Each structure stands twice: as C-alpha cells, then as structure tokens.
C-alpha cells in the first residue's frame, strides 16, 4: 500500500497566503517520517501563537508545538515542530 504524498507546492502557496507579513520563516525542514521543523522571526509572542494556530487549522499539519522562543533585538525567534498529515 502506497502512502499518500503531501502536495508540497499547494502547501507552500497556502502558507505564503496565510502567514502574517510581520513573520519571516527562515528555515523549514521535513524528514522522511512526516515530521517538520520551522524556524523564523516574529514581531511578538502573539505572532508566534498566531502561526501555531494557522498551522493547526491547515489540513497539512497536525501536532504543532512551539519548541522554543527567544527574544532578540529585532523580535522573537521561534522554533516550531510537528507532524505532517499524509495526503493533505
């Protein structure tokens, strides 16, 4: 039985449309077991919460968790991890 693949092109377009303009993703990685990690910068902790909620609402992601946030001079740096839904 073949696993359904995540339609990455559609997912990236939807992410670009939904992620707020004051948020920058600096790194997005996927592993073979459908896990993902995302790093980026946001203006506030509230922006990080919004990103997590956006990801949870999207059909591609599940089990979205903030691994770490750090305050730097130009805003918040965030590290999010989670699991991809198969077939999104």
Image (cartoon, rainbow, N blue to C red):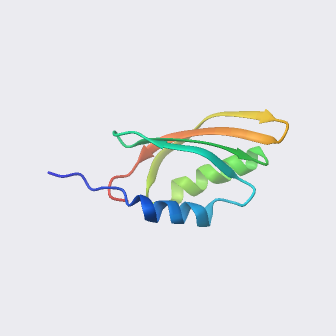
Q: Is residue 29 left or right of residue 47?
A: left
The quadrant in which the C terminus is found is bottom left
Residue at 66% x, 44% y is: 40
Using the rendered view, name the quadrant where residue 66 is placed.
Answer: top right
Q: In this view, does 71 lie to the left or right of 50?
A: right
Query: Could you say where residue 13 lies in the image, as x and y percent from the top left?
Result: 52, 65
Which of the two residues, 9 or 6, is positioned nearer the viewer here?
Answer: 9
Residue farthest along the left direction in this orientation: 1
Using the rendered view, name the quadrant where residue 27 is placed.
Answer: top right
Query: Could you say where residue 42 lies in the image, as x and y percent from the top left?
Result: 74, 47
Work out whether 59 lies above or below 71: below
Query: Could you say where residue 23 lies in the image, as x and y percent from the top left?
Result: 71, 53
Work out whether 33 lies above or below 53: above
Residue farthest along the right direction in this orientation: 73
Work out whether 13 lies above or below 43: below
Residue at 52% x, 53% y is: 56
Count of labels shown? 0
Residue at 46% x, 52% y is: 61
Residue at 83% x, 42% y is: 74
Which of the two residues, 47 or 15, is positioned nearer the viewer here?
Answer: 15
Q: In this view, does 29 lie to the left or right of 71?
A: left
Query: Could you say where residue 39 lies in the image, as x and y percent from the top left?
Result: 61, 41
């Amino acid at each position: 039985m073949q696993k359904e693949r995540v339609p990455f092109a559609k997912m990236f377009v939807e992410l670009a449309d939904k992620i707020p303009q004051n948020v920058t993703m600096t790194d997005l990685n996927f592993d073979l077991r459908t896990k993902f990690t995302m790093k980026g910068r946001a203006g506030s902790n509230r922006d990080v919460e919004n990103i997590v909620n956006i990801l949870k609402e999207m059909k591609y992601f599940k089990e979205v968790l903030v691994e770490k946030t750090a305050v730097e001079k130009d805003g918040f740096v965030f590290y999010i991890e989670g699991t991809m839904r198969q077939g999104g």
